[in-house]
Amino acid sequence: MIPTYVTGFPRIGKKRELKSALEAFWAHKFPFHEVQNLAKSLRQKHWQYQSNSHINYIACNDFSYYDNMLDTMVMLGAIPKRFCDILDPVERYFAMARGDTTHQAMEMTKWFNTNYHYIVPELSMAMDLHVDISKITNEYVEAKNLGITPKINLIGPLTFLALSTCEGNDNFAYFDAILEAYATVFKQLSALDSHLIIQCDESFLAKTPEPKQLSLLKIAYEKLGHIAPHIDIAVVTYFDHAKEAVEILGNCPIWAIGLDFVYGEENLEALCYIQGKKLIAGLIDGRNVWKNNALKTASLITRIGEVIPKDQLIFSTSCSLLHLPYSIQEETKLDTCIKEKLSFAVEKLHELSELSHFFEAPIAYSEPVCTQPSSTSKPKLTHYTRSAYKTRESLQTKVLNLPLFPTTTIGSFPQTKEIRSLRSAFKRGELSAEAYEKAIQNAIKACVAFQEEIGLDVLVHGEFERNDMVEYFGEQLEGFAFSENGWVQSYGSRCVKPPLLYGSVSRKHPMTVEWITYAQSLSDKPMKGMLTGPVTILNWSFVRDDIPKSEVAYEVAQAIADEIDDLQRHDIKIIQVDEAAFKEGYPLRVEKIKAYEKWAVDSFKMAVNSAWDQTQIHTHMCYSNFNDIIHTIEQMDADVITIETSRSGNKLLKVFQKVGYKAQIGPGVYDIHSPRVPSVEEMREQIEAFLHVLPKEQLWINPDCGLKTRGQEEVKASLKNMIEAVHSFR
Ligand code: GLN
Ligand code: ZN
C-alpha cells in the first residue's frame, strides 16, 4: 500500500463555526477562551475526518485564527514596529490582521492564483526576531493526545521571504536573518518528539523562480536539513510545476519533495532528480470540486511509477484542501446528477485513500450516470466583425453626443440594508415577484434621479437586483448550480460560495434587459447596460474540468453576446462588460501566459462581437498596473476601459501613452475603498495629472470601482465633488 498525505485541511468549520466565533469575539460578545475551545474542537474534528479515511500523514499547524502567513510572522517574531506597543498577543494579532482604532491593518493580497488572501509581512532591518513556537507545540500535543502523530506545516523560509515587502526593497538582504530564525524554530521543535516531519510550503517555486532564489533554496535546506537527525523535512510545492527546483532539492538533505501533478504535469519531466527521496505526488485536485478522474490519475501514476520505485512513493492532494468546501453531505438541495459529480474536502480524503491500493487493485472507473455533454456546436471565435476602433469611434460620437470628459460610474450604487433584505425576502418566497419588482424599480428610480440631478453624463441602474456580479448571471444561465454550504475561506473570517459551473452553458432568457430598459425609460441620457465578462465568470466559479477551460469560456461568451444583442435592440447604446478578475486568472508560469491570454481575449471578443459599431463597449478592470499586459488589453479592443489607478496617480498610466493606446480610458479619479469624501481640489489635481499622459479626447471621469460597499451619503458627496472638478476643465 502507498501511504497517503494531506497537504492541509480547511479550518473555518463545516458550518463556518470559526467565522461566527471570531466575529462574535470582535464584537465583544464572546470571550477569547471560548474561541479557543471552539478552535480546539474544530481541529479534533478535522483530524478525525482524516484518520477515519486512514490518511497516514496528517498536518498540524494548518489551523489558523486568521491566516498562516500572519502566524508565521508571530512564530518568527517578525512584528512590524507599529504594533509593538500592543502587549497583549491576541489583541496584537488581530490588530495586525484587521487594524484597530489606532493601528492601520497590514496589507492583504491574493495567495498565488487562488481567491485566498494572506497578510503581507513587512520586514525591516530594525526588526528584532524572536522565535515563538507555542502555537505549534499546542497543536502538536493536542493531536498526540488523540493518538495522531502529525506532521508540522510551516510556510517555507524562501516563500515567506519572497512574499514579504521589505524595507529597502531588497528581499535577499533579509535572507540570513530569516533563515537563522527558521533554524531556531527547527531547534526548538526538535525537542517535541523523537521523530518529526516538518512540511515546508515553498509554493513560490511554482512561479518561475530566479537563479538567485534557487541558490538560496539550496543554502536554506542544506542548513535546515542538518539541524537535527530526527527531523525529516518535506518541501512541498503546488499550483504548477516546480521543475527547476526539483534538481536542487534532490541534492539537499531533506526527506521528501512534494509536487503537484494535477496543475503541473510537467513535473513528470523532473522525476529523475528526486534521487533517493520520497516523492509526495499530488494527484487529487485540491482546488476544484469535481470527483477525481480515475483514468487520468491511473495514467499519471503509471508514468510516475516508471521512474520512482514504489517504496519511495506517497500519494497526496495537489495542494491544501483549504480551497474547497467541507462536504457534499451538507448539500440537501442539489440535483443528484450534479451531486454525483462532486467531491469536496471530506470526499477528497476518501478518494485519496482509495488510491493507496493502486498497485494491488486498479482503481474502479465508473461512468457517471448523468453525463453532461458540452454543446454540440462548439462556439469559436472565427470572425471578429467589429470595425476598426476609429470607425466605431466616429459613429459612437454621433450617436452619443457626449461632452468632453464624459462622467460615469462603474455600475453599482450603495447596497443598503433595505435592499439586501428585499432580495433575501424575495429569495425566501416571502415577497411576491410583483412587490419585489416594484421595490427594485423604486431603488432604480431614486438612483437615476440622483445621477440626473448632479449631472452625470452616462448613467447606470445601480445593480440593486444583484447579490454578486457572478452569481447573478450564474443563476440565470443554464449550466450553473449553487450549493447551500459550499463556503471557501477568502480571508480572515470571510468566505465565498463560488457557483458550480457543471454543464453546458447557455442563456435561457434575457438577464438584464428588463432592469436596464426600465432605467433607460426614466432618462434621456444614455443608460449603460451592465454585464459580467466570461473570464471573470470563470475565474470566480468552480469550473467543470472535463473539457478545456477555453471551451467553457466560449460558451459563456456566447451567452453574453446574446445579451448584448438584446440590449442594443432595446435601444441601449452603451454596454459595460466587467472583467474584474481578468488579471488574477493569469497562470503562475511565464510559459503558460500566452495560452491564457489567447482564450481570455478571444472569449471577451466573442462576447462583444455582437455589438454594432455604434454600440459603445466599456470594460472595467479592478487593478492598475497594466505594464505587463498592455498589449493584451489593446487586443480586447474595448471602446472604453475604466481602471483602478486612483491610488497611483498618472505613474501607471504612462504605459498607455507609451504604446500609443487609441481607445478611451477612465482611470478612476478617486479611491472607493476608503470611506472618505475626496475634495474637489484633490480630484482636480488627479485629472490634471492624467492630462499629462493622456489626450483630453481619450479621458473619461469616474470613480475607480463600483460603489456597492460605500455609504449613501458619502457616495453622493463624492460624486458631486467629482462633477464639480470636471466642470472647471471643460
Ligand atoms: N460593475 C461592478 C460594480 O460596480 C464592478 C465590480 C468590480 O469591479 N468588482 O459593482
Ligand atoms: Zn473594480
Image (tube, rainbow, N blue to C red):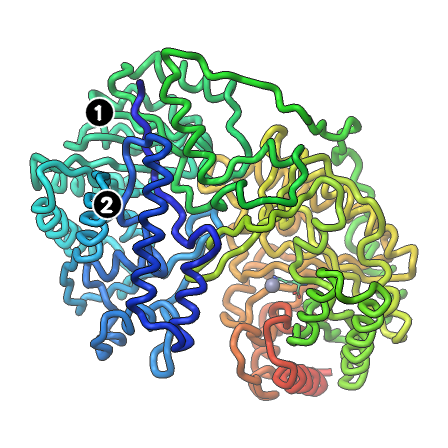
**Residue at image point 55% right, 48% down:** 486
Count of numbered circles in the view: 2
**Which quarter of the figure has residue 94?**
bottom left
Q: Which label number is shown at residue 120?
A: none
**Which quarter of the figure has residue 496?**
bottom right
Q: Is residue 108 above or below residue 358?
A: below
Asked if labels 1 and 2 touch by Cβ distance under 8 angstroms, the answer is no
Q: Which of 703/64 is in front? A: 64
Q: Which of 38/202 is in front? A: 38
Residue 72: image x %, image y %? Answer: 26, 56
Q: Which label number is shown at residue 143?
A: 2
**Residue at image point 9% right, 44% down:** 190
Q: Amino acid at mark 2?
A: Ala
Question: In the rendered image, which quarter contains the C terminus?
Answer: bottom right
* Mark 1 Cα-neighbour bin, 10 Å: few <14, some 14–19, many ≥20: many
**Residue at image point 30% right, 62% down:** 36
Q: Amino acid at mark 1?
A: Lys
